[in-house]
Structure formats: C-alpha cells, structure tokens
Amino acid sequence: MFLPTTIKEVRALGWDSLDVILFTGDAYIDHPSFGAAVVGRLLEAEGLRVAIVPQPNWRDDLRDFTKLGAPRLFFGVTAGAMDSMVNHYTANLRLRSNDAYTAGGKAGFRPDRAVTVYTQILKKLYPHIPVVIGGIEASLRRLTHYDYWSNSLHRSILAESGADLLMYGMGERVVCEVAKAMRNGYNAKLLRKIRQVGFIADRDYVERIEDKIELHSFEECARNPKAFGENFVTEEVQSNLLEPTAALVERVGDRYVVINPPNTDITTEELDHSFDLPYERAPHPRYRGKGDIPAWEMIKHSVNIHRGCFGGCSFCTISAHQGKFITSRSEKSILREVEAITRMPDFRGYLSDVGAPSANMYRMRGHDRSLCAKCRRPSCLHPKMCPNLDNDHRPLLALYEKIRAVKGVKKAFVGSGIRYDLFDGGKYLETVVKHHTSGRLKVAPEHTEDKVLKLMRKPSFGLFEKLNEDFRSICRREGLNFQLIPYFISSHPGCTEQDMRALSQKVLGRLHFNLEQVQDLTPTPMTLSSVMFYTGENPYTGERLYVARNQDDKKRQKSYFFRKK
C-alpha cells in the first residue's frame, strides 16, 4: 500500500492520528529514488504512522497544510529531488516551461525556495509543532551560501526558514535517530547530540561545545568575499573526512548556526535496508489520467548500485550531499531489485541504467583505510589518482554478468556517466561497449583546456582522446555503430572565450563531434565553482580568475558549442 496522502486514505488504514507528516515539492512516487518515499518508508519501518502531502498548494487558503491536522512528532519538509531554483530556472535565469517531477511535466506546482515557503507556512499555522527540513535544497544551504538567482549571499536556510532542525546529507540513519529522540516530545538536549543535524543555538550553548570550528559569520562573509571562500574550504574539508568529529559553528546576527559532524559511512546492510523496503515502485494512484511523470519514466527500469562519489568535481554537489566515500549495495539486494523490475507490467527486457552518481565506482575504497582516515583531499582522482585507491573493476564486472543472467533481462544498459580516468581501456570498457551500451555511451570530459580542467578538478583532455580511440577500436572490431556522447560545460570560472574557441576547434573540428549535451554552468550552493563564481578567485590558492557573469558573455561562450569553424 502507498503511504496515505489524504484524510480519507488515513482513515482507510484505521488510523486516528499521525506521527509524522511529510511535505514535498515533488509528486509522490513510491520508489527508492525519491527522498520523501524513502524517509516515509524508513519511519514506517520504525512503527510510525506517516503521511505524505505532495506538492501542496501554497497560494490558496492553505487547506493542503491543514487537511491532515497536526502530527504527534514533527512535520518533515523537502523541496524534492532537486533544488527548487535549479528546477525552475535555466542557467541564463529564464523560467522553465516544464517540471520533470510533476504529472504531465507541468510547471508551477511548487514555489521558488520551496523549503522556506513550506516551513514558514507550517510554523505560522502550527507554531508549537517542530518542523524538520531535509533533502538537497536544505542540505546544500545549511550554511552561508551563494545564491545565483539573487546574485547574493544568503544566510543558512535554518535562519531563513525558521525550521527547528535540519537533517543534511542522505537520511537513512539520521531520520530514524531524530524520530526516536522525539518520541516523547521535542527534546533539544537529545536532538543536539545527533550527528548530521543542524540547528540554531545561543552563545551559551556554543561555548559548551568541546570540539568545534568557528567559521566567519554571515555578516563577515557578506562584507568580505575572502572570508566566504575560507569558510567553504573548511566546510569542504570537513564534509569529506572519513571520521569527522568537529561541529561547524557560524554566527548569524546574535544567534549561531550549529552543524554537527556527519555520520561516518553507512554500512551495506543499512543501504540494503533502505532499498529493500516495501515500495509500490509506482506513482501514487492520484496521478492517473494526469499524464506521465517524466522523472519516473526515466528511472523506473533503472537500478542504483552505490552511494557517494570520490571524483570531487568543482561544480558537483554529490560529495557535499552523499559523501566522498562509496557505500555499495550487496549483490543480493541489487539482484532482488532487478527481478522486481522484470515483473513490472510495462517492462520489455531493457534496464535503462545500472549505475550511480558515477557508474563505475562500485565497491571501490582505499587499500588502507587508516590512510583514508588521515586524508583531507576533496578528490581521490584529482590532480592524479590516489595511490591508495583500489580501483578494481572486477566486482562490478561480476555484478554485470549476474544481472545479464537474470531471467527476463535482454539488455542492461549503463546510462550513468562513467569515469574514464578510473580505468585504462581494457576489459571494463570492452564489456560496457559490447554488453551495456544502448548505442550511446555517456562520458563527461567537461572541457579541453588544461587550465580550465584543473579548476574543474577534471583529468586532462588527452585521456578522453585515448578513450575515444579505444571506443572506436572496439566498435570497429565488434561491428558496432555506436556513439560516444561527451558532455561539456561553458562559463566555468577561469574559462574565457579563447578557451571556448579552442574547445570548439578540438571537439567540433579535429574530432568531428556533433554536440547534443551541452551546459552553461549554473553555480549551485555549496560547490567550489559557485564560490569561485562569486568571489572571482580560487579559495584554495587565492588565484584571481576571469568569470563570465554577464548573461551576454555566458551566451557567447555557449555559442562555441555549435560552431564548425
């Protein structure tokens, strides 16, 4: 059964009250790829009565916020699977005409800055009921951050929304700990001991924290961009530690945002538990007749095999949200999900993706974990691959072979991008091309020029050219008419028109690619790229950078993707 979304559905379950009510900016799809469903199922497994209110109407009489009444424990709020501003606006700040997480792909079913809007409404209607915020929007705005859409620094979302508690990162462990701490009411003493949460405190509380790092205040960051850059370096280093211990403290006015250290890696068993919960693996019946939900159509026949990414790309939010260290699902859990997909009525034998944030990091970790515990690098691959990294692809190849053997699976494609700096041709690339490519293999060189790639924390373009040669060689040998699909980014800090001209000459000219997947950088909160975009310098080195901030300059840079000469 789906988690209830209306009072009628609540009563059909025989419930006279609810423990937790979740509000989300997405349509409700009961599947492990959608955060509200995961949190709801985790809390349900703890014996709690949970309901979901998807895409509440924030414009009218607010009946969506009152129809289920007040929960016994707390309201949970998330913007959904995307930051609402990224969801609404293109890189050149134009309003999008669609929303992949809404029935029929229709836009307009969530507000800008959804977490703040939903939270403020709930706090006004139910001032004494705790509101706990989480998901990507809350997670990446947990401290002072650059907001591209207003071109200014914003305070922590805790201060802007008025939420009582913030859960950042992935929620498998922390959401259950928060729920247990609230079983007998809001207990600040218990809640403030939990890892991976944030809250507002006074100076007296902050002075009692034994292990803490005090960041520059929001006001100091607003006055001095260099202070903002220094804060980011501290935040990134701390979020990528294997065994973090210090709380981050940032003053905002006369109060303090306290961000407790993240949890150490969750275990394979915990990740399996999250994916193995009794999801309906479908959109809620309330969307029947309202059109397909594009995000669901894209992932419904795909399988996520691991969590985290150690690539550390400057423009990417994955390590800040999911963590740098990889936690992999067990083969048994993955194969159970594959078998469940084969039983779906519309499955025709083709898995659209066997992947993850980066498709080929399954079961990868350091040879010596004690060295990982000392490491402060944001990337295991940049500026060169860590010698302690075990990049053995054999466990992944064995998994692919077992998936291919599942009855009903004709093809299992790798639709996620692969990190070609993790392997040197060889068996992995050949296996993927022969058995797991739909005809188009995605990779992300992002640029061609070394100075830009260094700022992006991406490998030399020479590695992509080697991959291109190996890919074409395999295709010729196997008689396959496949395409390599590279992704590139324009307007990254440090990238000039001259750099884009060089990219165009190499990619469109010498290599004869016809580019389809191109992207003008959107500086998203809590990324190195957004800090460089705002400050005009690399916070790690102090190097001053050219930044294409003007929309006309950004459009000119993107135009080079489409020039043959």
Image: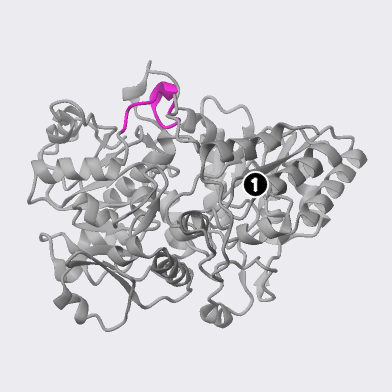
Residue 106 in magenta stretch: yes
Q: Position of residue 44 (x, y in %)?
A: 27, 48
Quarter holding the C terminus is top right
Amino acid identity at mark 1:
Gly
Q: Is residue 171 above or below residue 347?
A: below
Q: Position of residue 476 (x, y in %)?
A: 91, 39
Quarter holding the N terminus is top left
Most foreground residue, 553 or 491: 553
Q: Report the predominant secondary structure element of the magenta stretch.
A: loop
Q: Is residue 235 above or below residue 31?
A: below
Q: Does the image show residue 434?
A: no
Q: Is residue 318 above or below residue 26?
A: below
Q: Residue at x 47, y 71 (%)?
A: 237
Task: Classify 10 Å Cα crowding around label 1: few (below 14), some (14-19), many (20 and above).
Answer: some
Most foreground residue, 96 or 484: 96
* 229 sits left or right of 256 in the view: right
Q: Residue at x 42, y 36 (%)?
A: 87
Residue 460 in magenta stretch: no
Q: Which residue is mark 1?
A: 417
Q: Is residue 529 above or below residue 258?
A: above
Secondary-structure class at tag 1: loop
Q: Position of residue 414 (x, y in %)?
A: 66, 43
Q: Position of residue 227 (x, y in %)?
A: 39, 69
Q: Does the image show residue 134?
A: yes
Region of the chain picked out in magenta, as a range: 98-110
Most foreground residue, 49 or 170: 170
Choose top left, top right, bottom left or bottom right for residue 179. bottom left
**The residue positioned farthest toward the top in the image shown:** 289
* 379 sits left or right of 46 in the view: right
